[in-house]
Structure formats: structure tokens, C-alpha cells
Amino acid sequence: MQEKYEIILNKSSILLAEDDISVRDSFKRVLLLFVKKVYTASDGEEALKLYEEYNPDIIITDIKMPKMNGLELIKNIRELDHDTPIIVTSAYTDQDFLLASIKLSLIEYVVKPIKESDLDKLLKECAKVLEEKSKTIVDLNSTCKYDYDNKILTCKEKNIVLTHKEVEFFEILLVHRGTLVTKHAIEDKLYIYEEAPPSALKNLVFKLRKKIGDDIVKTVNKLGYIIE
């Protein structure tokens, strides 16, 4: 998945409606690899209450659930908003549902179990929808912001133009914001198609800090770097 969409998803929440507890728990663990928060519901009524309370960014729902099925849940949600990306899962293909869901603006209808590669594609489509709803501008501190679309860092209302490699480095840290990213992991992504001298990453960070100062990108015990 492109890092641009990883950043969007890392800030997002998902409402997962699934009545099978084992499927629900295992699916939640997988989804937390992609998003910040996952709310879970065991039936349609509980899912609707969670939606109204937390306003999640993405919804994934099964079709056949007690109290309120997936189709009824989606119809209720669509009465409130038409934009939230929704993915429907089922253990089999339900032709009646497919016909009824045409007007419900779904991202996809998929048969379980979902392959991780397919899930990656589906969540990327969701991230595209979320991107249209909000600009991808990240606050770094009280005076600095990063504009992901234009690849520009702004500090104290002054734009700082970054090189291509500096942008890649910066965005790798943003994807894992708050977590140490090792030098080895960064080098694997930055120099995947080229050979680079051992000092390449160190020199890149040195030049970047000359532009932006030492406050944003921090070194952790000589192991790697972090943006808090």
C-alpha cells in the first residue's frame, strides 16, 4: 500500500460488525495492523449504536446478523451520511443482497475469508474516499506542518522544500509516527533500487536537519529515528 494511504489509515477508525466471535476477534487483530482503532459489534443494532456514538471512518459489516442484518444497518447509516466507505463481507454470495445494495454506495462486496492482499486493496480504496473528505496535512508541532500532497514542510509560516529522498525519509517516519524506525529498515526502503554508501543515510539526515532543525526528527540511541 502506498505510504500516502498508510498515513490516512493510521489515523482512521473502523467499525467491524460480525456475529461470529472468533472471526470478529481475529479480523480485529488484522485490521489493527492498518488502522488506529477498531470498534466491534456482534449484531446490527449494536453496530448502529456504535456508529452514532463514535462516527467511525470506515465500516465493515457481515450480511446475516441477529437483531438487524447488514443491509438494514447500511440503509440506516446511509440515511445519515452518504460518504462513509462501507465494505460488506459474507460467507457466500447473496444475489438478493447484491441487487438491493446497488444504491448503497459500497466500496465492495467480498466473500469471506478475505485475503490480506485483497484487504490491502480494499482499505486503499477506503483511504482514497477519506482523502477526498479531508486534506492530508499533518501537524508536527505548534509551528510546523507537513503537506503530504505538495510535499512541503511549513515551519513558522515558511515553506521548506525537501528533496525527493528527504520526502521519502520523512514520510517513512510519519507512517510509523511515535515509533522508532531502525536505520536498517529506512535504508531498505530508501535505497531499494540502488547501492548507497554506509554514510548515505547519515548525510541525508544531517542535511535535512540543517533545513528544519533538530526538534522534529530525533535520533534514538544511534539505532534509528523517530518523529514523535
Image (cartoon, rainbow, N blue to C red):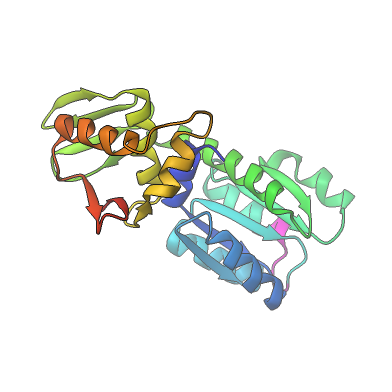
Is any part of residue 136 visible from this angle? no
Q: Residue at x 15, y 31 (%)?
A: 210
List the single residue furthest toward the left. 156
> For residue 171: magenta?
no
**Up/down of 81 relative to 153, above or below:** below
Which percent across, then down, holds residue 204? 28, 33
Question: Which residue occupies 58% across, 67% down?
Answer: 29
Give the residue at the far front of this rendering.
Answer: 197
- At 38% from the left and 38% from the top, the residue drawn is 171
Seen from the viewer's position, the closer of residues 60 and 34 is 34
> Which percent across, then down, holds residue 185?
44, 48
Query: Outermost residue, bottom direction?
Result: 21
What residue is at 56 percent from the left and 64 percent from the top? 48
Q: Give the image location of residue 42, x and y in percent.
A: 64, 74
Q: Is residue 111 left or right of residue 46?
A: right
Q: In terms of depth relative to the viewer, which is nearer, 15 or 174?
A: 174
Report the quarter where the N terminus lies. top right
Which one is in front, 179 or 34?
179
Q: How many marks?
A: 0
Image: 31 above or below 144: below
Q: Position of residue 173 (x, y in %)?
A: 35, 45
**Residue 92 visible at all:** yes
Q: Is residue 148 left or right of residue 109?
A: left
Write the start and end of the magenta stretch as one range: 66-72
Q: Nearer the viewer, residue 128 or 10?
A: 10
Horizontal arrangement in the rendering, residue 96 relative to residue 89 (left or right): right
When asked about the image quadrant of residue 168, the answer is: top left
